[in-house]
């Protein structure tokens, strides 16, 4: 495969390093993590020692001093290694999202307190947005954070929270003024270890992405210092919107890598598998289906690579990012379904990577903003 235009020699070296790390430290445990439904804490600390966590956070805060391209390389290689579904070991949330909320909106004291711990794997980060009654419609969140002297008192329930079982640090989306709608939303950081009133729910039994823990979180008069507010009170919704272009691009990149992986393993399978005395690849239907799948994967790669170049230039376009997110995840569904079909009955077996990819792919059209919301964003810009 040709090198993407945004990947230079330094990033290509990082690509090799992450691939070796994943093969040595992560892949041998992947099946066990799938079964236990959570990644070991030791894996996070190993990733921290290898420089894989917070790669795009400045060195003064314990990070790797890179940029978003470094995060993209790491995300790609973890998916190619087949560990932990679309977000690898959950690093896309902890390093790619939580750390950047803190970097963008945190005070100097907050950055010094939290970022180095995220970079070493001592802390694992989560974002608590979704609620039982509020998914893509973030303006409808009902979790509240009431000021009481020098503390916020948080009450509410969150669900579908990636890293929910492991998290030490949670960025909670809450209403500090419920009368103001979106203008009353704030981001408040909760350190889970010492937070009375914080409780983890069960590790949710998902259809796919089994190694990635996903949980309910409960806040019952949970008290946190007022200094845990990220940025300015009431600007939480704006802060979320400012970060979404990058978050949706990384989802599009994940979907693209999953497509490429599906085509790769299916091509190998149909070369080896025979039917009626000849390889499956010899049949015209197999050739046509794989030709279509390969073409879609190449188009997706061209699209997201172009968007990566623009993001790295500071030309983030939320509308194009929405296009990329919904198109690549929709197309991923088409590609991986055809690849399962070409595997026949084996494609439906969980021990086959294509079956796991198929199960992991479905949620890509839902999280990060449902694809229907993405299409509404694009339609408003017409």
Image: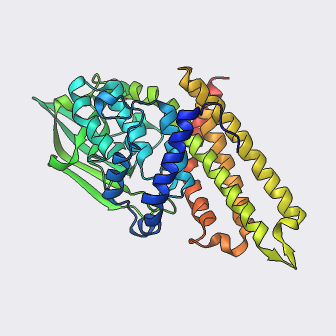
Q: Nearer the viewer, residue 352 or 151?
A: 352
Q: Position of residue 134 (x, y in %)?
A: 42, 43
What residue is at 56 percent from the left and 72 percent from the top?
351
Display coloring: rainbow
Q: Position of residue 207 (x, y in %)?
A: 51, 63
How many badges with numbers are in the image? 0
Residue 94 lies in what quarter of the image? top left
**Would you say 310 lies left or right of 218 here?**
right
Q: Residue furthest right?
A: 284
What residue is at 49 percent from the left and 36 percent from the top?
70
Whether residue 377 is visible, yes or no, is: no
**Would you say 215 lies left or right of 221 here?**
right
Whether residue 255 is visible, yes or no, is: yes
Q: Residue furthest bottom?
A: 276
Which quarter shows the C terminus?
Answer: top right
**Would you say 297 lies left or right of 93 here?**
right
Q: Position of residue 179 (x, y in %)?
A: 30, 28
Q: Is residue 352 above or below residue 376?
A: below
Q: Position of residue 291 (x, y in %)?
A: 82, 52
Residue 253 lies in what quarter of the image? top right
Q: Residue furthest left?
A: 149
Which quarter shows the N terminus?
Answer: top right
Residue 299 lies in what quarter of the image? top right
């Amino acid at each position: 495969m040709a090198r993407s235009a945004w990947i230079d020699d330094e990033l290509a070296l990082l690509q090799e390093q992450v691939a070796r790390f994943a093969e040595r430290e992560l892949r041998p445990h992947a099946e066990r993590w799938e079964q236990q439904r959570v990644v070991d804490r030791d894996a996070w600390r190993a990733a921290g020692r290898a420089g894989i966590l917070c790669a795009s956070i400045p060195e003064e805060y314990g990070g790797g001093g890179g940029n978003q391209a470094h995060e993209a390389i790491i995300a790609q290689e973890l998916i190619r290694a087949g560990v932990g579904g679309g977000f690898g070991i959950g690093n896309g949330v902890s390093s790619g999202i939580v750390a950047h909320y803190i970097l963008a909106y945190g005070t100097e004291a907050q950055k010094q307190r939290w970022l180095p711990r995220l970079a070493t794997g001592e802390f694992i980060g989560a974002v608590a947005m979704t609620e039982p009654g509020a998914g893509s419609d973030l303006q409808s969140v009902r979790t509240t954070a009431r000021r009481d002297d020098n503390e916020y008192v948080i009450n509410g329930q969150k669900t579908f929270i990636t890293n929910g079982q492991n998290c030490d640090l949670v960025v909670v989306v809450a209403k500090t003024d419920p009368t103001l709608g979106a203008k009353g939303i704030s981001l408040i950081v909760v350190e889970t270890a010492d937070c009375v009133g914080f409780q983890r729910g069960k590790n949710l039994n998902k259809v796919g992405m089994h190694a990635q823990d996903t949980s309910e979180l409960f806040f019952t008069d949970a008290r946190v210092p007022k200094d845990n507010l990220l940025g300015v009170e009431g600007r939480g919704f704006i802060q979320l919107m400012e970060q979404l272009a990058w978050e949706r691009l990384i989802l599009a990149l994940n979907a693209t890598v999953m497509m490429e992986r599906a085509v790769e393993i299916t091509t190998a399978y149909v070369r080896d598998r025979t039917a009626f005395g000849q390889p499956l690849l010899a049949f015209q239907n197999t050739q046509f289906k794989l030709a279509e799948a390969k073409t879609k994967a190449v188009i997706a790669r061209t699209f997201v690579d172009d968007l990566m170049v623009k993001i790295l230039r500071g030309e983030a376009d939320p509308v194009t990012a929405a296009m990329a997110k919904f198109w690549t995840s929709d197309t991923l569904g088409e590609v991986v379904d055809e690849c399962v079909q070409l595997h026949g009955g084996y494609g439906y077996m969980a021990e086959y990577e294509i079956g796991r990819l198929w199960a992991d792919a479905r949620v890509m059209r839902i999280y990060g903003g449902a694809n229907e919301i993405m299409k509404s964003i694009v339609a408003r810009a017409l």
